[in-house]
Amino acid sequence: MNSEEEFYDAETGLESDDSCEVSFKDALVFESKRVTDGSTVQENGVWERRKLLPAQMIPRNNFSVWSILKKCIGMELSKIAMPVVFNEPLSLLQRISEYMEHTHLIHKACSLSDSIERMQAVAAFAVSAIASQWERTGKPFNPLLGETYELIREDKGYKWISEQVSHHPPVSAFHAESLKQEFEFHGSIYPKMKFWGKSVEVEPKGTMTLELLKHKEAYSWAYPMCCVHNVILGKLWIEQYGTVEIVNHSTGDKCVLNFKPCGMFGRELHKVEGFIQDKSKKKRLVIYGKWTECLYSVDSRVHENYKKMGGDSKKLKQEHSCEGEEPDEMPDVQETVTVIPGSALLWRITPRPAHSTQMYNFTSFAMTLNELEPGMERLMAPTDCRLRPDIRAMENGDIDTASAEKERLEEKQRAARKERSQDEKEWSTRWFQLGTNPHTGAEDWLYTGGYFDRNYIDCPNIY
């Protein structure tokens, strides 16, 4: 396989309602209800979103990633060919749409009259957007240049469109908007990865912008670093670390969140701590929790009194160090967050389905992303990644076809790039253009509109 293939990971009273509990014993029941396009219907004939993938996760036991990565220590993994078995059956474009799993938090922000309370809800949304990454150690498929992904969720009140706007460097642009013109959420992702011997470090470069249209507010932030441990030996595990600043460009309010690295003895694993300050830089609220579990807020004065009363001095059990011997041992996870009296729950993660571990550790939301809804194929763009034969084959458990199709698509993409070079033609994006973000002043990929008019005559033939 050609080494030009790019390898990168993307970047989990307000609970969502997406949880479901389905066992593999139920698979036969669902299978009996399937119609010809792969969807499921209830007994009364009403279509429902699927709760299982067509096949279980393909085992990786007989494959060694070390043979590929051993020469790449300290390098940026931009041109490393990886076997398809290390993928999960989603494109990166689908993976980043998982930011929208907890959209109810945006709707909550839209409904609040106080800007500090709105910032709480926006902070909860920002943290919830990466919660689905926990234990998702499979790599999404690299989007082909010009690939798109649309998602319309009338039940959650939004529609989403994303496009792979650049191949070198790989850039994915997205735009989501409320069906009732309440908000817009947009940005672009340029994930950079480095291999450090035992771990892969992912820097999800790119800025997110959330606009609350009713309040005429715009918020922006960038996500923290992500590290996948034990890529060679041992159990894979993930940590997020770094500082995230969420800025309200309209009011001057700011939320600063510190995603804590594992640290010695694992006592900080998954923790998120921070604060919200107003435009005068006065601390109003303290934010705390775990990005894998939940997020709380408490008045800063209450938090200060709690600390003075010894609330932070409770001895913690010493677990294994994140910096221990080979392999990097994953510390025992403390399953709960100590709640400070007077705190408000901002967000709690949606439980994963019981069969998640056999299905790439997908959430219930992720389980639906590659599903073709009845009649959808006739409406959506021919570049939508639901139509990618390699991803569809892997989802169906056919690893040989998935590998062959992946190589065919990549070769087709290289041939198209060579032909454009010979003809001295530049690639033209279809739904986004490079411009200036009016809120941050930085260069950004901006949606030009028109996708949902359903005119796809000029779309490229990439599959």
Image (cartoon, grey):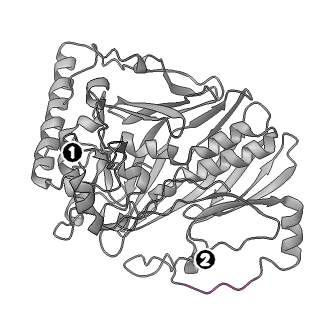
Q: Position of residue 367 (x, y in %)?
A: 36, 52
Q: Quadrant of residue 116?
A: top right
Q: Residues within 10 Å of mark 1 (few under 14, many from 20)?
A: many
Image point (13%, 46%), residue name: 1
Image point (28%, 55%), residue name: 53
Residue 265 circle label: none
Which of the two residues, 181 or 49, is positioned nearer the viewer here?
A: 49
Image-based side of 424 in relation to 402, left or right: right
Q: Is residue 316 magenta?
A: yes
Query: Three-letter amino acid code at disc 2?
Result: Arg
Instruction: Determine whether the residue tagged by mark 2 lies in a helix, strand or loop.
Output: loop
Q: Residues within 10 Å of mark 2 (few under 14, many from 20)?
A: many
Image-based side of 11 in relation to 299, left or right: left
Residue 57 in sight in this render? no
Label count reads 2
Instruction: Determine whether the residue tagged by mark 1 lies in a helix, strand or loop.
Output: helix
**Helix, strand or loop: magenta stretch:** loop
Which of the two residues, 97 or 270, is positioned nearer the viewer here?
A: 97
Q: Position of residue 108 (x, y in %)?
A: 68, 43
38 vs 61: above or below: above
Image point (18%, 37%), residue name: 410
What residue did someone put label 2 on?
267
290 vs 373: above or below: below
Question: What is the C-alpha distance between the residues marked 2 and 1?
Answer: 41 Å
Residue 104 in sight in this render? yes
Mark nearest the camera among 2 and 1 is 1
Q: Position of residue 270 (x, y in %)?
A: 57, 66
**Which portion, as a residue range, is magenta?**
314-319
What residue did someone put label 1 on?
392
Query: Three-letter amino acid code at disc 1?
Result: Arg
Q: Is residue 416 magenta?
A: no
